[in-house]
Image: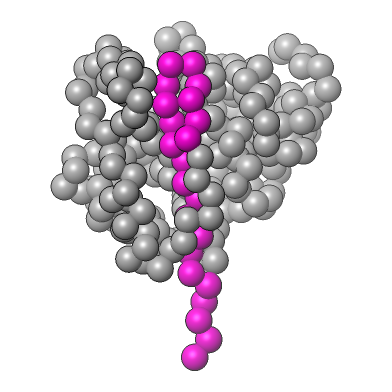
């Protein structure tokens, strides 16, 4: 296993860059995330492992992690092979969560990863189509990372609202998806999904997403557009309303 400078290993766990651990990765830390992703996935096909390493370079997981308070219980909808929760479990030994995805092979890889690193007491992955009901549980944080643009527009609002309903009062919904602008970056993203998944995606209008959260009484606490490589990301952290005392 490679040693990263300034890194530390949790008991039996992967080597985690100390900056990534201390700050939950407030600054862009591609090398550390890439290294962690390559350590997390030791099973599965070569292409699926390389794909996880590339995701760590493309997706601003460092920024997303900075919105997850230590010790959080997290629901990851459309979790893929569980990369976000795997990174979280590696950098925060008190974090836990559930990931769900419709792709059985991705869930199998996520489960192999959690068993390999002994995260299975804290993380659980379930094969579930977001057209169906989500696990009945309460979470501090819900994340939806690059999943909404894969859903049929007819189920996007209901999916977001159901997931938001699993958040405790005062908790956070971290929404991250691909931006529809600028045109060249959005086109690059369409080409990516066409080549990688054979799917012609439809970008999500952020104004609509913000409207759904407003209807639920959530407030946008943080908004950022993040260009990375040739991709354009947008991220909003929505805060759930606090519990009202009668
Ligand atoms: C771009 S991947 C993102 C995966 C993961 N969130 C990440 O950031 O690495 C989109 C994921 O959404 C999942 N997905 C798409 N439609 C879905 C549905 N109807 N129900 C559940 N998962 C779905 C896909 O299987 C895929 O794993």
In the rendered image, residue 155, in percent from the top left (x then y), is placed at 20, 48
Q: Residue furthest front?
A: 182
**Going by the image, does 148 lie left or right of 26?**
left
Say which residue appears at 63% left-offset and 42% top-offset. 66
37 magenta-colored:
no
> In the image as oriented, which residue stretches furthest toward the right?
6
| Residue 86 visible in the displayed image | no
Query: 29 and 90: which one is in front?
Result: 29
Pick the residue in front: 70 or 138: 70
Residue 32 rendering spot, x and y as whole percentages: 68, 21
Q: Is residue 33 above or below residue 166?
A: above
- When asked about the image quadrant of residue 108, the answer is top left
Could you say where residue 23 lies in the image, as x and y percent from the top left?
73, 39
- Which quarter of the figure is the N terminus placed in? top right
* Magenta-tinted stretch: 225-246
Q: Is residue 117 left or right of residue 130?
A: right
Question: Going 42% across and 21% down the picture, which residue do you hit?
Answer: 231
Residue 15 can be seen, yes or no: yes
Residue 73 drawn at (x, y percent) = 57, 53
**In this rendering, would 103 be left or right of 225?**
left
Q: Extreme bottom residue here?
A: 246
Residue 117 vertical position relative to residue 230 in the rendered view, above or below: below
Q: Residue at x 60, y 48 (%)?
A: 68
Q: How is the image coloured?
A: one colour
């Amino acid at each position: 296993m490679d040693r990263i400078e300034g890194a530390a290993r949790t008991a039996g766990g992967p080597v985690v860059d100390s900056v990534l651990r201390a700050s939950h990765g407030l600054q862009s830390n591609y090398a550390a995330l890439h290294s962690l992703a390559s350590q997390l996935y030791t099973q599965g096909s070569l292409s699926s492992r390389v794909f996880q390493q590339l995701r760590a370079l493309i997706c601003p997981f460092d920024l997303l992690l900075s919105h997850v308070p230590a010790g959080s219980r997290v629901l990851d909808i459309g979790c893929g092979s569980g990369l976000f929760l795997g990174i979280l479990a590696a950098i925060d030994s008190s974090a836990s969560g559930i990931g769900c995805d419709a792709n059985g092979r991705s869930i199998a890889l996520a489960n192999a990863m959690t068993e390999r690193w002994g995260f299975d007491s804290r993380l659980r992955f379930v094969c579930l189509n977001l057209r169906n009901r989500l696990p009945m549980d309460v979470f501090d944080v819900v994340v939806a990372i690059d999943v909404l643009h894969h859903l049929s527009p007819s189920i996007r609002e209901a999916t977001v609202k159901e997931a938001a309903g699993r958040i405790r009062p005062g908790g956070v919904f971290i929404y991250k998806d691909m931006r529809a602008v600028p045109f060249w970056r959005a086109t690059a993203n369409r080409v990516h999904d066409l080549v990688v998944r054979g799917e012609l995606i439809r970008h999500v209008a952020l104004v609509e997403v913000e409207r759904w959260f407003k209807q639920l009484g959530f407030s946008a606490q943080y908004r950022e557009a993040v260009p990375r490589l040739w991709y354009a990301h947008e991220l909003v952290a929505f805060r759930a309303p606090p519990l009202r005392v009668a």
